[in-house]
Image (cartoon, rainbow, N blue to C red):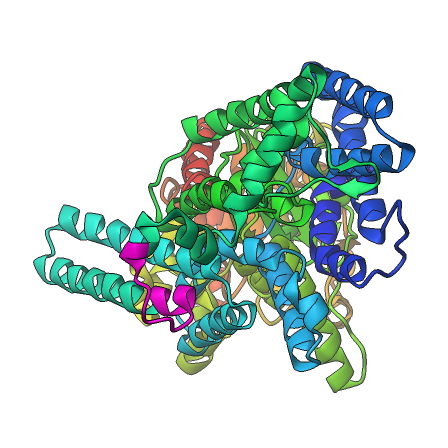
């Protein structure tokens, strides 16, 4: 059950992706008898799975009434078929029942799961591409029998025309735009479909209307004139192109004649549907009262009852007045709820409304839009794109949850998020680390490994495929995404793919680590301009960034890290066997032992130069052995003690007279906040600030030059403490409000 809950979106997406294969096998008569086909088997299993998911996994009790109504209708319909028809016709009627009512059942179920499932636009786009690929193969191999009724692909492409416009508008790459429209135009040509062409012109018309409306609001006269000219050209081209396709170069007949003449209308526009409509209406009229209410079905005496290929009429005659009402009342109630809470505020949502309009219009004049499982599922996905989730979905991407400043900061941040308002997911390159167990239950933790294959080409192929698969299933499905580990290429990529409302956290001031060219290159390789927000933990790192990337100034914001106040206060009271020496000033360093930034040798030299002092070093890193060797060379083994990694460093901090940092560069170290909370003096080489805290008010700032540092620390040891206090709870509440504005900014 838990697996289904965590992977319901994935399973639905996979079924959507294999739909073209199912349809091709079904159309090819593979695994097909008089009673069943591979399509019926797979779609039947999917239908049962979705019902099981809603009732037993998610326990959607509100569905009991509509499911019961559907079940009662099914029993009556099947009973009537058994009463009036032969066995073969009964089986065919049941197949028709499942095929047609597939739409309201799946629609009802997936709408009820709208908070739990998120389908990527790239899943839908990939599905369309697979359909198109198969279409090309059939066209090239000249397989006319399959090409003629290829999975009712005309209907699928017709309702997806606005979606194709969306995908085109989402890319600035001209080549991609050309490829997308080439796929669309070539597909329309192969299928020779008037419906697709009509959908294209309707979508283009409404697109022009959308942009004209926006330009009127902005009072941009030049753009309005250009768009009006474009609309005139569009209408003119319709007047030229559509008659040629419809009339097949028959110059003796005009569009005006067709509109006035029912016979010509039936032949050239409706493809004899009006004739079939009359025949089926006559069969319905001659049926008994039971069939008028519950439907004449699809077969009689082992012969198929004429299909009109106009969805509304086919549903009415095949399922009667009661079946028609059951079908559409369910759909109309859901559509009302969807449309009640949506608006056309942006182009994408506007286009989804146009897709819905096309579904409604095309179902009246064409068939297999809402009565075909393939196209009806796509209709449902398009409509679900219009729904708004009550809870925002947040994604944080990082390397691991091992012991470290970034990892601890991420832990404190996600644990502070209100899970009643937000669904939180963490994706790690390595799902490991001491902080994993401390993450609040209810937060979803995933792993997406980066290949470390020694063969370069193979490694690149594997990583590319993993990226592609992730994009297909996760493109923009989150309301907010964040690359929390600045250095991680994988986290960076996932955050950019997963949401258009994306951010990157910059935890350090890299201007101190790199020269100007290296600094610029560091951020460019991380596609910094593609992020909507760039979050810094200190004003200094933000200002240095703006000096190099002034054009990104409006994207920058300062939000410092969080600490868990209650946890720190509780853990700080735990007893440890280690005790500071009497009559000595104790300095405590906490952090990664990496001399490229931390420069712990400065702290060790400080102990050597100042009597009656000692240093506790808590942490691990690549330079630990080097530091230990350096300490031994200075004969400071009794005064400088290495404790290694500590899950709970706070009892050690409580014994300190001073928390010390002798780094070359930092962002805004978490240890500053921890020291302020525990009311500890801070000696540091890093003067930093955020929007609320200037560390100069809470710490002694000393020189990075070791001789000057010794002089300054000696003076500090003689001074009484004069640090300020601050209410960290209030401060963090303000920061969370600031973050929530970012979460909701989409």
The structure residue drawn at horizontal position 42% and vertical position 76%, both measured from the top left corner, is 520
The structure residue drawn at horizontal position 76% and vertical position 60%, both measured from the top left corner, is 27
Q: Quadrant of residue 633?
A: bottom right
Say whether residue 514 is magenta: no
Is 80 on the left-hand or right-hand side of 656?
right
Image location (x, y in percent) of residue 465: 71, 70
Whether residue 529 appears in this view of the structure is: no
Q: How many marks?
A: 0
Numbered range of the magenta stretch: 242-257
Image location (x, y in percent) of residue 452: 78, 74
Q: Which quadrant is home to the N terminus?
A: top right
The structure residue drawn at horizontal position 52% and vertical position 40%, both measured from the top left corner, is 383
Rendered position, 678 above or below 695: above
Q: Between residues 696 and 4, which one lies in front from this camera angle?
A: 4
Image location (x, y in percent) of residue 221: 8, 57
The structure residue drawn at horizontal position 40% and vertical position 79%, both measured from the top left corner, is 516
Whether residue 275 appears in this view of the structure is: yes
Say whether residue 253 is magenta: yes
């Amino acid at each position: 059950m838990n697996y289904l809950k965590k992977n319901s979106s994935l399973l639905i997406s996979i079924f959507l992706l294999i739909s073209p294969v199912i349809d091709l096998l079904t159309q090819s008569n593979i695994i097909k008898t008089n009673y069943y086909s591979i399509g019926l088997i797979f779609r039947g299993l999917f239908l049962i799975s979705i019902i099981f998911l809603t009732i037993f996994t998610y326990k959607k009790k509100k569905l009991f009434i509509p499911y019961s109504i559907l079940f009662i209708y099914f029993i009556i319909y099947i009973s009537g078929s058994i009463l009036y028809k032969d066995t073969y016709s009964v089986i065919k009627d049941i197949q028709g029942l499942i095929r047609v009512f597939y739409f309201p059942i799946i629609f009802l179920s997936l709408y009820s799961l709208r908070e739990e499932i998120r389908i990527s636009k790239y899943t839908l786009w990939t599905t369309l591409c697979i359909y198109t690929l198969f279409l090309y193969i059939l066209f090239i191999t000249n397989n006319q029998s399959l090409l003629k009724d290829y999975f009712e692909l005309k209907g699928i492409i017709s309702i997806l025309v606005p979606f194709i416009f969306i995908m085109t508008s989402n890319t600035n790459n001209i080549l991609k735009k050309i490829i997308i429209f080439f796929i669309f135009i070539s597909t329309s040509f192969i299928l020779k479909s008037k419906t697709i062409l009509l959908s294209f012109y309707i979508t283009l018309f409404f697109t022009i209307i959308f942009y004209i409306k926006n330009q009127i609001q902005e009072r941009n006269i030049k753009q309005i004139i250009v768009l009006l000219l474009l609309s005139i050209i569009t209408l003119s081209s319709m007047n030229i192109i559509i008659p040629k396709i419809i009339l097949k170069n028959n110059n003796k007949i005009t569009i005006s004649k067709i509109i006035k003449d029912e016979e010509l209308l039936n032949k050239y526009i409706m493809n004899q549907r009006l004739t079939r409509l009359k025949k089926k209406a006559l069969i319905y009229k001659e049926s008994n009262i039971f069939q008028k209410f519950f439907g004449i079905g699809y077969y009689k005496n082992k012969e198929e009852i004429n299909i009109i290929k106009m969805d509304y009429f086919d549903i009415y005659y095949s399922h009667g007045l009661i079946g028609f009402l059951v079908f559409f009342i369910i759909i109309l109630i859901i559509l009302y709820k969807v449309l009640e809470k949506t608006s056309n505020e942006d182009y994408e949502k506007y286009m989804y409304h146009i897709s819905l309009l096309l579904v409604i219009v095309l179902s009246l004049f064409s068939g297999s839009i809402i009565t075909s499982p393939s196209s009806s599922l796509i209709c449902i996905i398009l409509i679900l794109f219009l729904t708004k989730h009550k809870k925002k979905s947040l994604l944080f991407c990082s390397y691991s949850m091992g012991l470290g400043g970034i990892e601890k900061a991420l832990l404190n941040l996600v644990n502070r998020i209100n899970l009643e308002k937000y669904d939180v997911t963490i994706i790690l390159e390595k799902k490991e680390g001491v902080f994993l167990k401390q993450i609040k239950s209810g937060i979803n933790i995933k792993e997406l490994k980066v290949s470390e294959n020694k063969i370069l080409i193979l490694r690149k192929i594997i990583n590319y495929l993993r990226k592609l698969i992730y994009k297909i299933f996760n493109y923009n499905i989150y309301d907010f995404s964040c690359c929390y580990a600045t250095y991680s290429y994988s986290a960076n990529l996932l955050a950019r793919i997963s949401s258009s409302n994306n951010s990157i956290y910059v935890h350090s001031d890299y201007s101190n680590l790199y020269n100007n060219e290296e600094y610029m290159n560091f951020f460019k390789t991380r596609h910094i301009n593609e992020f909507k927000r760039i979050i810094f933990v200190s004003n200094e790192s933000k200002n240095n960034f703006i000096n190099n990337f002034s054009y990104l100034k409006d994207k920058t914001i300062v939000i410092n890290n969080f600490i868990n106040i209650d946890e720190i206060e509780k853990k700080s009271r735990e007893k440890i066997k280690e005790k500071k020496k009497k009559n000595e000033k104790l300095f405590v360093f906490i952090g990664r032992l990496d001399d490229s930034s931390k420069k712990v040798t400065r702290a060790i030299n400080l102990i050597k130069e100042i009597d009656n002092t000692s240093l506790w070093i808590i942490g691990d890193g690549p330079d630990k052995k080097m530091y230990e060797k350096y300490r031994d060379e200075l004969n400071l083994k009794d005064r400088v003690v290495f404790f290694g990694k500590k899950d709970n460093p706070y009892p050690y901090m409580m014994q300190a007279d001073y928390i010390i940092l002798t780094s070359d560069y930092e962002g805004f170290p978490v240890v500053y906040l921890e020291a302020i909370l525990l009311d500890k003096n801070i000696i540091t080489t890093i003067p930093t600030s955020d929007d609320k805290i200037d560390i100069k008010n809470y710490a002694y700032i000393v020189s990075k030059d070791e001789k000057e540092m010794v002089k300054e620390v000696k003076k500090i040891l003689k001074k009484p403490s004069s640090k300020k206090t601050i209410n960290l709870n209030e401060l963090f509440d303000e920061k969370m409000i600031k973050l929530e504005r970012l979460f909701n900014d989409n």
